[in-house]
Amino acid sequence: MAYTIKLPVFEGPFDLLLHLVKINEMDIYDIPIAEITRQYLDYLHVMQELDLEVAGEFLVMAATLIHLKARTLLPAPPEPEEQEEELGAIMSARELMRQLVEYRKYKEAAAALREREEAAARVLYRIASVEVVPERTKELSLDVSLLYRAFARVLRYVDVQPYRPDLVEQFTVEEKIQYIEDLLRRESEIDLTKLFGRCLNKLEIITTFMAVLELTRLRRIRIVQENPFDTIRILRGPEQIEYEFSEPRHDDNAES
């Protein structure tokens, strides 16, 4: 709460009194600074303690009032240079008033923040339950760049064979997709390096790699690695399609 004073010509906050004096709404001659000081000392006696914020405001504003009253009681100097000094003093007083207004804004903002902090301290939040994750789930999902580097390492160890047009039709991405999914139905996981190691040449490795990328995009497989430099494994994905192959049915009636 702002410190208030009571005078015959004014009653209210001290900073408001100073503001009224500054804008010439009140005559500085009517302000008894001695009475203001006495009231402030009585205020400190009642409070039984020194509020540094209130004391700081009082000292600054009381000094400003004393300066203004002393300047009005003394004869004005006729020299232009001294008039400029007086103008500078007036500007300094205005700057002081601006700083007081800014200081009050900051103090009000600090009080609002304290109220929010106290309100937040009274709120009890529900603690989220901690789910125990099995050790197996520490596996890391791989990005495409790491998968490509693994593919490039395997590709370097394969003998380069001459281009053969007949091999272009021998391996297709669709066939490799079906081959990988068939392996995952028989096995829980596939070693990526061993999968590439079953290929006969680079063309088959490239086709297999494209099939792995497509299955990953469709979320029908997951590429995981528990720790850096560990074995890269292929697991079933959430969107894996379960289907079975069956022999085509023959319509006996059609043959007859």
Image (cartoon, rainbow, N blue to C red):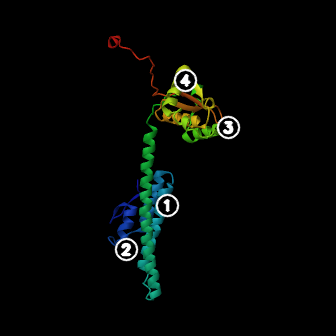
Above or below residue 78? Residue 242 is above
Position in image of residue 69 (x %, y %): 42, 74
* Residue corresponding to mark 4: 183
Q: Secondary structure at mark 4?
A: helix
User: Observer-nearest residue: 134 or 43?
Assistant: 134
Above or below residue 5? Residue 87 is below
Q: Residue at x 37, y 71 (%)?
A: 22
Circle 3/circle 4 CB separation < 8 Å: no
Q: Secondary structure at mark 1?
A: helix
Q: Give the position of the C terminus as an image quadrant.
A: top left
Which of the 4 image quarters holds residue 148? Answer: top right
Instruction: Name which residue type carries label 2.
Output: Tyr
Q: CA distance from mark 2 to mark 3?
A: 101 Å
Q: Residue at x 43, y 78 (%)?
A: 71
- Specify which label sits upstream in the sequence, 2 or 1: 2
- Specify which label sits upstream in the sequence, 1 or 3: 1
- Specify which label sits upstream in the sequence, 2 or 3: 2
Position in image of residue 66 (x %, y %): 45, 71
Q: CA distance from mark 1 to mark 3?
A: 81 Å
For marks 2 and 1, give the one nearer the viewer: 1
* Residue corresponding to mark 3: 157
Q: Secondary structure at mark 2?
A: helix
Q: With 54 as the anchor, is 19 left or right in this view?
A: left
Of the numbered discs in the image, which one, if any, rests on residue 56? Answer: 1
Q: Secondary structure at mark 3?
A: loop
Of the numbered discs in the image, which one, if any, rests on residue 115? Answer: none
Position in image of residue 19 (x %, y %): 37, 67
Q: Residue at x 36, y 70 (%)?
A: 21
Position in image of residue 58 (x %, y %): 46, 62
For marks 1 and 3, give the one nearer the viewer: 3
* Residue corresponding to mark 2: 29
Instruction: Name which residue type carries label 4.
Output: Leu
